Every structure is written in structure tokens, then in C-alpha cells.
């Protein structure tokens, strides 16, 4: 506007030019100006006000001072209204001469033209400001929509990722991955209620830090549900609590109101000392009550508005469903493992023999299965003296779930009974008796097994007789490191197959030799060749240091040969003849 005031003084040869503004002109983005800069506009302001208040038409007056009540010096005034796009008065472009003056038609025309240009400039400013505001509003709305889309995508991923979690550690990891990318918290904590006490769900620390970015070593101690920690209050009161930290004047924020016995600025013990600005404690509501809480913390003030609170609450709902499912699965797996451990044999102590077994459950499904090992004394034949013979079995009932474990328990017991019902007979007779019993009882058991009888012989030797029902071939390694594969086998066990005769083979185990029985979970791996893995197993067995104890030997064999992603359970069972 300064330019128009300056041009007016030059065109009309006056000492003072003025752009005076109504509020509408101020809204148009104009700034009242005088020329020369710093001049006193007071003589012209009342005339501008009268021009706008009366008829809003151009006014050119001389000797204005004669009409003033305060006796001010006379001056000449010329003014033209500045008009907006809708005809509204934006202000006045005015000129003032300190001496009496008669205004010519050229003066009136020049000032009117200049006022029209000034009005156009102000209208253009109005439109530009409107466009700018609209653009800023559109950008703000686009940002808000983008954030809403990101939050929607976050919740969609949460509903998908948390729908198939397999345990609490899996829930912890997936929640961390989900919120770490979108919400970008500086700290995350997951606590669950167990017997009236809150426990942190911990995982394996990454890069030296504890789970969810809290310092290592701070997530192990449980704390009371009745304590003053805001997370405990969120669980007790079943509501979301927002806490503002030291950067927010060190006081508890909306709904926090820390109770006695806990700090007001740390939402959870895992955050103590992290100097977070904002934390949100979200209760995890399960089917039968609150399971615990998910806590998110930021190191800068974080606005938790209505929309953000809705997103966090929904995320907590998905987390609660995953936690409830994980707790159920953990309980189910615990029961299954206890059942299977109860069915696995306590190995007997046999003079002249060392026995050791190792069982590894599958990493999927119920984490139990149909693999088993067994060892028990054999009864003597009728009328014969006790021989000290021992029965050995390693078997695999198809499947790796609770049903397979239950069938395995039945088959194991029936095979034992078969040995005791046929004293003095070979292991093949016991397998045949098992098959006949399963068929008569309509027991749908299928799988593989190696059943063997081990009898002491002269000079510290033992006689091994075995029958193989479609099972991986046992290995024998002698004291000098030579390995033999006992390859002879018959068809597998299957309830749909008619029982037929089975074969029996035998060999002598000299002192210092080791017999290894195992299931296919040790040597079977997706994309690999079983025969290659059996060869690898034989090489590791032959390379074992002389006299190494069987328990560490089995563990080393499992680590060297067993698949990393255990899709099937595995059994290793070793018997060593004492060296002479």
C-alpha cells in the first residue's frame, strides 16, 4: 500500500498520501500506509471516516480546516473509496495538501484511477489469502487423512498379525513390531496379571536392551496390583490412563492421579529412569476380566486426542485377544508336555550297560507327538532262570499333537504287555501281537518302530535281536570307531494292514560299543535328503571322543544333525556296553 500512497503524492503534487483502511481492508491483507513514511495522518483520518460514513463517494474538499471545531489549520483533502469484490468498502485512498487548493478534473480522474488499481490489488490479496488458507486447510486435511489411513493400516495389520500368534513371546514381538513403525514410542511394556501380581512379559533382549526398549534388567521383578504405579491403576480401574512425565511439570496427567506408593511420572517400573514425556496405560480386557495392560511411552509430548485414543484402544483390544489366546495355548501345551513326560520311561539301571535318552518336542502345533522310547526288563521263559535281558524300543506314531501322544501311550503299554505275554519269544512276536491287538480293538494307530531284545552274553558281550517296522535304521559304533547300519526292516505299522509275519535279525555288541536308536525327526528336514543326514549322523557318531558320556553325546548329535525348524518331534536313545 506504500506504493499507492507514494504514487498519489507524485501524481497530484501533494505532500501527503494515505491509504486508510476499514476492518474489511485489514482482512484483505492490506496495511495502512502514509507517504512520506512516518508522516502524521491525523488531519486526513476524520475526513476519511466522514467519506465512508456518508455516501462512500469520492470527495475533494478545500479549506477543510475552516469547518473544524478545534481551530486546526485549513488543508485540502481528496479521497476515493477502495472497494472490494462484493462492493464492500475496504478503505480510502486519500491525499492532503497543507495549503488551500482547487482540485481539477485531472486530479479527480488520476486519484480515482489509482484508487481502482489499489482496490484491484487488495481484491487480489484477498483471493490470494483465500487460496493460501484453502491450500493450508487442504494440506492439513491431507495430513490428517494420511495419518488416519496410517492408523487404519496399523489396525488392519494388527488384526492380521495378532490373529495367529502362538505364544506370549510371539505376542510381545509382534506388538513391538507393529507400534514401533507407526506410533514410534520410545518405550513399550506389556504386563499381565498372575495371581494378583503384575508380571512383565519379557523376551530376548536385542542389542543389549531389554524387551520393548526398556533398559535391560528392569523387566524381571513383578509388582503389586495394588501399588501406585499408573499401569496398576489402569488394570484395577479397567480404564485408559495417560501420564505426563518430567517435561510436563513432573505431574501425573489426564486421569493419572498417582496413588500413594508409586511415582506419578513413571507409568510402569520398566520406564523408571527413561525420562519419558508422555505414557499411555491401556488395559487389556479379556473374556473374563482384565488380563493386564499395554503401556506406550514417548520421549516428547504426545497428544492423545479422541481419534488417537480410539486407535490405541482398538490396538489394545487386538492385543488382549492375542494374549488370551496365547495364555490358552501355553496352558494347553503345558498340560500336553506334562502328559507326555509322564508317559516317557525312566530308564532302568542295568549292570554292564549305560543308557541315555533325549526327547525334543516339535516347535509347532501342540509341541508334543507320538515319538517315544522305552526300556524295561524282560521276563524269563517259563521254567528258565532270569537272564537279565532288556527290551528296547524307539517308535513314532504318526502325528505331533495330543491325539498322537495319546495313541503312543496306548501302543507303548500294549507292546510292553505283548513282551510279558510271550516270555522267551523274540521282538518280532511282540510286534505281531501288538498289531493283532490294535486290529481287534479297532485302535487307529499307525507309525514305525524298532523293537529289540538285549541279552547278556559271555565275556562282557551282549546279544542284540531286533525287528524293524519301517523305522530309520539303528546305528552301532564299536570301540574302534567303526559304524554299522542295521538296515534290515519290514513294513510299517498301520491299522489298515493285515498283520503278517515279521523278521528278526541279530548281532553281538562287544564291550565299548554303542547302539543308537532315533526317530525321523532327527534326520528329516524339508528340502534335505534323509540318507545324507543319516550319513552325517554316522560320521558324528564315529567321531565322538572315546568314553564320552551318552547324555552330552546325544545333545551334540541333535545340535549337529537335527533341523533348526523342528516340524516333528525327535527321540535319540543310546545304549553303551561297558568296556572290558
Image (spheres, helix red, strand yellow):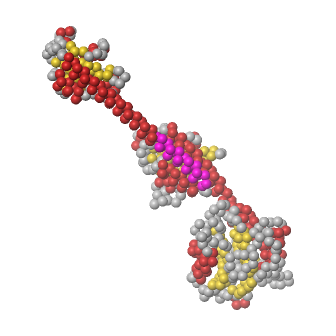
Q: Quadrant of residue 77?
A: top left
Residue 524 on the magenta segment: no
Pick the front one: 530 or 14: 14
Can residue 28 be seen here? The reply is: yes
Q: Residue at x 74, y 84 (%)?
A: 505
Q: Quadrant of the N terminus?
A: top left
- On the picture, is 514 further left or further right than 271? right
For residue 88, side relative to residue 111 (left or right): right
Answer whether residue 72 is visible to the viewer in this image: no
User: Given the current orientation, which residue lies at the most extreme left position?
Assistant: 99
What residue is shown at x 52% (from left), y 60% (from top)?
A: 204
Q: How many marks?
A: 0
* Residue at position x 61%, y 74% in the image: 529
Q: Is residue 208 above or below residue 121?
A: below
- In the rendered view of the protein, which quadrant contains the C terminus? bottom right
**Of residues 242 and 302, which is closer to you in this image?**
302
At which x and y percent is residue 185?
A: 46, 49
Residue 197: % across, % down:
58, 49
Percent from the top left, x then y, of residue 340?
A: 70, 65
Quarter residue 49 falls in? top left
Q: Position of residue 514 (x, y in %)?
A: 65, 82
| Magenta-drawn stretch, dominant element (helix, strand or loop) | helix
Q: In the figure, is residue 140 to the left or right of 177?
A: left
Q: Is residue 579 above or below residue 151?
A: below
Chain part drawn in magenta: 144-165
Amino acid at each position: 500500500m506504500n506504493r499507492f500512497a507514494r504514487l498519489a503524492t507524485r501524481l497530484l503534487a501533494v505532500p501527503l498520501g494515505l491509504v486508510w483502511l476499514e476492518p474489511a481492508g485489514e482482512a484483505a491483507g492490506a496495511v495502512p500506509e502514509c507517504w512520506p513514511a512516518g508522516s502524521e495522518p491525523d488531519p486526513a483520518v476524520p475526513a476519511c471516516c466522514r467519506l465512508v460514513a456518508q455516501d462512500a463517494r469520492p470527495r475533494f474538499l478545500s479549506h477543510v480546516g475552516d469547518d473544524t471545531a478545534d481551530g486546526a489549520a485549513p488543508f485540502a483533502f481528496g479521497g476515493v473509496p477502495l472497494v472490494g469484490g462484493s462492493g464492500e468498502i475496504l478503505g480510502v485512498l486519500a491525499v492532503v495538501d497543507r495549503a488551500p487548493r482547487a482540485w481539477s478534473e485531472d486530479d479527480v480522474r488520476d486519484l480515482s484511477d489509482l484508487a481502482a488499481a489499489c482496490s484491484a490489488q487488495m481484491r487480489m490479496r484477498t483471493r490470494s489469502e483465500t487460496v493460501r488458507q484453502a491450500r493450508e486447510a487442504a494440506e492439513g486435511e491431507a495430513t490428517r487423512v494420511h495419518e488416519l489411513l496410517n492408523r487404519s493400516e496399523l489396525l488392519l495389520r494388527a488384526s492380521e498379525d495378532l490373529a495367529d500368534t502362538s505364544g506370549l513371546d510371539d505376542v510381545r514381538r509382534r506388538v513391538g513390531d507393529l507400534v514401533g513403525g507407526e506410533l514410534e514410542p520410545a518405550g513399550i511394556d506389556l504386563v499381565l496379571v498372575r495371581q494378583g501380581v503384575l508380571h512383565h512379559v519379557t523376551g530376548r533382549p536385542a542389542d543389549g536392551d531389554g524387551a520393548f526398549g526398556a533398559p535391560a534388567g528392569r523387566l524381571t521383578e513383578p509388582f503389586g496390583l495394588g501399588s501406585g504405579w499408573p499401569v496398576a491403576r489402569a488394570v484395577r480401574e479397567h480404564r485408559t490412563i495417560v501420564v505426563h512425565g518430567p517435561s510436563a511439570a513432573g505431574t501425573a496427567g489426564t486421569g493419572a492421579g498417582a496413588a500413594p506408593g508409586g511415582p506419578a511420572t513413571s507409568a510402569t517400573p520398566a520406564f523408571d529412569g527413561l525420562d519419558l514425556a508422555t505414557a499411555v496405560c491401556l488395559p487389556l480386557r479379556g473374556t473374563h476380566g482384565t488380563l493386564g495392560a499395554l503401556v506406550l511411552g514417548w520421549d516428547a509430548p504426545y497428544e492423545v486426542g479422541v481419534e488417537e485414543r480410539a486407535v490405541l484402544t482398538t490396538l489394545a483390544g487386538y492385543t488382549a485377544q492375542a494374549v488370551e489366546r496365547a495364555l490358552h495355548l501355553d496352558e494347553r501345551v503345558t498340560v500336553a508336555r506334562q502328559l507326555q513326560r509322564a508317559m516317557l520311561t525312566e530308564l532302568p539301571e542295568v549292570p554292564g550297560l549305560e543308557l541315555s535318552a533325549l526327547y525334543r518336542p516339535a516347535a509347532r502345533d501342540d509341541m508334543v507327538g507320538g515319538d517315544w522310547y522305552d526300556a524295561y526288563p524282560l521276563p524269563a521263559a517259563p521254567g528258565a532262570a532270569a537272564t537279565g535281558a532288556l527290551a528296547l524300543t524307539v517308535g513314532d506314531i504318526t502325528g505331533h499333537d495330543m491325539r498322537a501322544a495319546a495313541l503312543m501311550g496306548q501302543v507303548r503299554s500294549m507292546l510292553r504287555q505283548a513282551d510279558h505275554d510271550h516270555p522267551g519269544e523274540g521282538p518280532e512276536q511282540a510286534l505281531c501281537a501288538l498289531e493283532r491287538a490294535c486290529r481287534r480293538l479297532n485302535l487307529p494307530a499307525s507309525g514305525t518302530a524298532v523293537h529289540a531284545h538285549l541279552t547278556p552274553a559271555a565275556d562282557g558281550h551282549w546279544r542284540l535281536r531286533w525287528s524293524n517296522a519301517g523305522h530309520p535304521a539303528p546305528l552301532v559304533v564299536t570301540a574302534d570307531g567303526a559304524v554299522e547300519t542295521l538296515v534290515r526292516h519290514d513294513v510299517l505299522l498301520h491299522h489298515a494292514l493285515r498283520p503278517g509275519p515279521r523278521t528278526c535279525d541279530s548281532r553281538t555288541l562287544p564291550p565299548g560299543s554303542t547302539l543308537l536308536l532315533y526317530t525321523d525327526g532327527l534326520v528329516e528336514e524339508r528340502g534335505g535328503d534323509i540318507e545324507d543326514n543319516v550319513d552325517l549322523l554316522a560320521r558324528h557318531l564315529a567321531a565322538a571322543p572315546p568314553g564320552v558320556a551318552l547324555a552330552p553325546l546325544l545333545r551334540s548329535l541333535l545340535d549337529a544333525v537335527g533341523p533348526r525348524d523342528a516340524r516333528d518331534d525327535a527321540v535319540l536313545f543310546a545304549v553303551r556296553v561297558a568296556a572290558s
